[in-house]
């Protein structure tokens, strides 16, 4: 179990990277000033530079210590033993993340990352969930822009339906409603290297909507109409014209795992299922997006195409400048259909979540706020006793901290 005598409450591993710096900046500027924390990485000089850069953000707070660590088992185990929570921003995670998780599981240290690599998370669950439970380690991957917003929106909608109507949800339709943003080098590199690291059969198996759920869902999920399957376009009242989602393949398995972890599916309800889309201007642009994503996916399957793309994308650890992202934003919306029997009186709840700023800053905020939530609050994740869990298992304490940090969330019943 995690001991209260540990030196730090939180360590950021990979603090010199693009997302790592954003995480450190949010800790320095916004987290409790008495938080005991450290930055960690391979280069002491680069870590010192990060500490110098963030010091002016809040000179009154405890400044972070510096921990130099290589990605070796001995170094990582020694690092994990020093802290309650270890945040890893070192990706691609399928290349560098497993030894970090292994060290946290072995030492009973809580762990957070911001991966979107579902095949890797699938393997984590198979290999480490049981031992993490035994050692009391809360392991939460995909706690960044993938997949914390979607997972928390689903939990919030179901909670609202339970409080208002006493029922769970059937379909939740989640939409990337509006956004302006640019991917970092790490994101692009991860997408390309996934296809080099995993077989197509493993990608297919781990990419199924319920692949991460420990409980088999009874009954079949309603299939999409044939026209939607062909065109990728769907019209939804109060959401507009929708098309394929880039986030859906990462977010849906995590939300479905939350369904299973929270009261064994009883809280969300037996008929819960999530569909994810992106809002588009009209059916024509929706069709074009669908075709482009389909062709792009097929092209990435070809090694020469991946090789060519890797020559042009920015490198991991780099990304758009703060000047470039100062006007970025993202808004998600979702509608939950209540699981009621009266088809003549359908009930729906709507959630709107908005963030004004860089998507990577949002990921840093999610990581930092989750770390202090785990270190200082009691949550569902603590009650579950550890294991490979999800952002939603941090529940209301986590969501309240995110809202104080600038994440806007509104949940209401629709007429």
Image: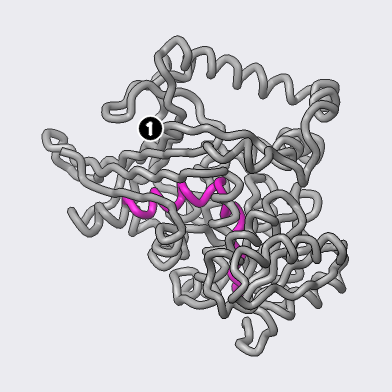
Tell me residue 257's x, y (percent). 50, 53
Q: Is residue 297 magenta?
A: no
Q: Residue at x 72, y 35 (%)?
A: 188
Tell me residue 367's x, y (percent). 58, 59
Instruction: Report the side of 82 relative to 23 (left or right).
Output: right
In the picture as drawn, the residue positioned furthest to the top comes out as: 284
Q: Residue at x 68, y 57 (%)?
A: 124
Instruction: Report the side of 65 relative to 271 (left or right).
Output: right
Viewer-proximal residue, 344 or 312?
312
What colour-coding does the image apply?
Answer: one colour
Q: Residue at x 75, y 42 (%)?
A: 318
Q: Is residue 203 visible?
A: yes
Residue span colored magenta: 132-157
In the picture as drawn, the residue positioned furthest to the bottom comes out as: 5
- Report the residue marked by disc 1: 222
Q: Is residue 162 above or below residue 28?
A: above
Quarter holding residue 291? top right
Q: Is residue 139 magenta?
A: yes
């Amino acid at each position: 179990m995690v001991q209260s005598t540990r030196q730090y409450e939180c360590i950021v591993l990979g603090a010199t990277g693009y997302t790592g710096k954003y995480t450190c900046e949010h800790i320095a500027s916004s987290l409790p000033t008495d938080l005991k924390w450290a930055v960690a990485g391979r280069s002491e000089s680069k870590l010192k530079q990060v500490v110098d850069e963030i010091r002016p953000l809040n000179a009154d707070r405890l400044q972070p210590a510096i921990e130099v660590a290589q990605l070796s088992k001995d170094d990582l185990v020694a690092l994990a033993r020093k802290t309650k929570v270890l945040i890893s921003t070192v990706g691609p995670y399928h290349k560098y993340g497993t030894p970090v998780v292994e060290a946290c599981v072995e030492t009973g240290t809580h762990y957070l990352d911001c991966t979107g690599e579902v095949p890797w998370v699938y393997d984590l669950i198979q290999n480490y969930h049981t031992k993490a439970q035994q050692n009391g380690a809360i392991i939460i991957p995909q706690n960044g822009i993938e997949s914390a917003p979607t997972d928390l929106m689903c939990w919030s909608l179901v909670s609202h339906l339970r409080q208002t109507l006493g029922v769970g949800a059937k379909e939740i339709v989640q939409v990337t409603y509006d956004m302006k943003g640019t991917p970092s080098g790490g994101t692009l590199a991860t997408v390309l290297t996934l296809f080099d690291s995993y077989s197509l059969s493993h990608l297919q198996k781990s990419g199924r909507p319920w692949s991460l759920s420990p409980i088999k869902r009874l009954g079949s999920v309603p299939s999409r109409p044939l026209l939607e399957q062909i065109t990728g376009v769907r019209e939804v009242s109060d959401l507009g014209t929708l098309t394929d989602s880039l986030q859906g393949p990462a977010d849906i398995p995590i939300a479905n795992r939350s369904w299973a972890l929270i009261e064994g599916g009883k809280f969300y309800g037996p008929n819960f299922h999530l569909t994810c889309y992106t809002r588009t201007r009209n059916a024509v642009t929706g069709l074009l997006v669908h075709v482009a994503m389909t062709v792009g996916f097929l092209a990435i399957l070809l090694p020469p195409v991946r090789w060519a793309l890797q020559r042009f994308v920015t490198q991991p650890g780099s990304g758009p400048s703060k000047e470039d992202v100062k006007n970025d934003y993202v808004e998600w919306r979702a509608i939950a259909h209540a699981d009621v029997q009266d088809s003549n009186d359908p009930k729906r709840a709507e959630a709107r979540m908005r963030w004004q700023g860089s998507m990577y800053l949002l990921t840093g905020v999610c990581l930092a706020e989750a770390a202090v939530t785990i270190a200082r609050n009691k949550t569902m994740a603590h009650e579950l006793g550890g294991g490979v869990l999800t952002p939603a298992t941090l529940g209301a304490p986590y969501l309240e901290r995110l809202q104080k940090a600038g994440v806007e969330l509104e949940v209401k019943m629709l007429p």
